[in-house]
Amino acid sequence: MPRAVDGTRRKDRRKKILDRAKGYWGKRSKLFRTAKDQVMKSLRYAYRDRRNKKRDFRALWIARISAACRAEGMTYSRFMGGLIRANIVLNRKALSNLAIEDAAAFKALVEKSRQAVGA
């Protein structure tokens, strides 16, 4: 009877890594050892960047709101402070979309904020 070797399990484990490494450049997609190292690093990057994505989008929304506020002659911090005083609860994503898609509504919010601040 032939000796049993870790055939399919070993092949399956390596195939799983090499499948994940598809599209990588050079030997990182062809050789198991380098592909394994790169896949592990890629998974670390993916884990980290799922958290950083939230940070990046919030910064983008704030930049858009700030630009729209400055076009109306108001700073971002005064605008947000005025919204809080006027009891208007909108998140930054919604405010950013409002500034892009409905300039008239955003202008009305700026006016409400300005009245609440008293400037």
Image: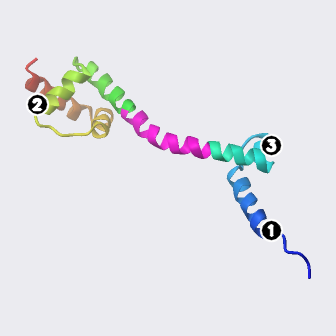
The nearer-to-camera label among 3 and 2 is: 3
Q: In the image, what residue occupies the spot 85% across and 74% down?
A: 4
Q: Would you say the residues marked 3 and 2 are in contact, meaning their CB atoms lie under 8 Å apart?
A: no
Q: Nearer the viewer, residue 13 or 54?
A: 13
Q: In the image, what residue occupies the spot 36% across and 34% down?
A: 58
- Does residue 96 sit above or below 75 in this rendering? below
Question: Residue 40, position in %: x, y?
Answer: 64, 46
Question: Residue 39, position in %: x, y?
Answer: 66, 47
State the SS at label 3.
helix
Whether residue 23 appears in this view of the structure is no
As drawn, the residue found furthest toward the bottom would be 1
Q: Which residue is mark 2?
A: 85
Q: In the image, what residue occupies the spot 7% across and 20% down?
A: 118
Q: CA distance from mark 1 to mark 3?
A: 25 Å
Q: Which residue is mark 3?
A: 27
Q: Nearer the viewer, residue 38 or 102?
A: 38
Q: Which residue is mark 1?
A: 6
Name which of mark 1 and mark 2 comes first in the sequence: 1
Name which of mark 3 and mark 2 comes first in the sequence: 3
Q: Quadrant of the C terminus?
A: top left
Question: Residue 44, position in %: x, y?
Answer: 57, 43
Q: Nearer the viewer, residue 14 or 103?
A: 14
Q: Quadrant of the N terminus?
A: bottom right
Report the magenta residues as a range: 42-58
The nearer-to-camera label among 1 and 3 is: 1
Residue 21 in magenta stretch:
no
